Amino acid sequence: MRTFRSGSSASNRWRLALGTLMAAMALTLALAANAVAAPSDPFKGVWTSTDTDGSHQTLSFGGSGDTRKVHYFDDGASACGWPDIIATATLVGDATVSGSSANVDVAGQCNGTGGPLSANVTYTYDANANTLIDSFGVIWSR
């Protein structure tokens, strides 16, 4: 059996390899934390919120550039009769992004009744909180 002394070249190689591995892990963690803290595209992805009427909403932005595709779903749309009846709504459309704001035009319907719906809403990205705030004052999170 071979015994390594602290001054041996094998022991030094082991320490160097371990130090390199730890430095690489620290760099990977720092890069991952930075990616979460500062998204390169603050709008892209799926957002959720509680509507002013208490229902749950989902909003998603797709694509890139100044014009995006948007999908909105409300699991209890007051414009469709909620809370008196179970009434969901789905709207799709486009967003025009400029800096930290997105102006969204969507159209769709009340699911079940087919009643038409449309909306124009502005969403502003808050980088400090990583949230969106819409023109109704509702806060959206990921």
Image (cartoon, grey):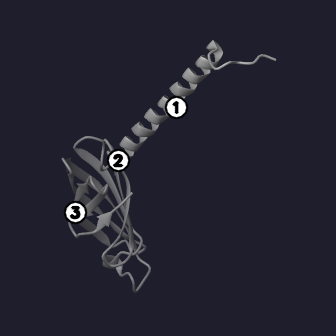
* Front: mark 3 or 1: 1
**Residue 138 percent across, percent down from the top left:** 28, 69
* Residue named by callout 3: 121
Please name the amino acid that badge 1 sits on: Met
* Residue named by callout 2: 37
- The residue positioned 36% from the left and 42% from the top of the image is 34
Rounded to the nearest angstrom, the CA distance separating label 2 from label 3 is 26 Å
Determine whether the residue tagged by mark 3 lies in a helix, strand or loop.
Answer: strand
First of labels 2, 3 by sequence position: 2
Rounded to the nearest angstrom, the CA distance separating label 1 from label 2 is 23 Å
Quadrant containing the C terminus in the rendered view: bottom left
Tell me: 47 left or right of 134: right
Quadrant containing the N terminus in the rendered view: top right
- The residue positioned 30% from the left and 70% from the top of the image is 116
* Residue named by callout 1: 22
Question: How dense is the environment of label 2, judged by Cα within 10 Å: few (below 14), some, or many (20 and up)?
Answer: few
Question: How dense is the environment of label 1, judged by Cα within 10 Å: few (below 14), some, or many (20 and up)?
Answer: few
Q: Is residue 72 above or below residue 45?
A: below
Rounded to the nearest angstrom, the CA distance separating label 3 from label 1 is 47 Å
- The residue positioned 44% from the left and 79% from the top of the image is 86
First of labels 3, 1 by sequence position: 1
Q: Is residue 86 above or below residue 9?
A: below
Q: Quadrant of residue 128?
A: bottom left
* Front: mark 1 or 2: 1
Furthest toward the left, the residue is: 98
**Residue 51 percent across, percent down from the top left:** 33, 73
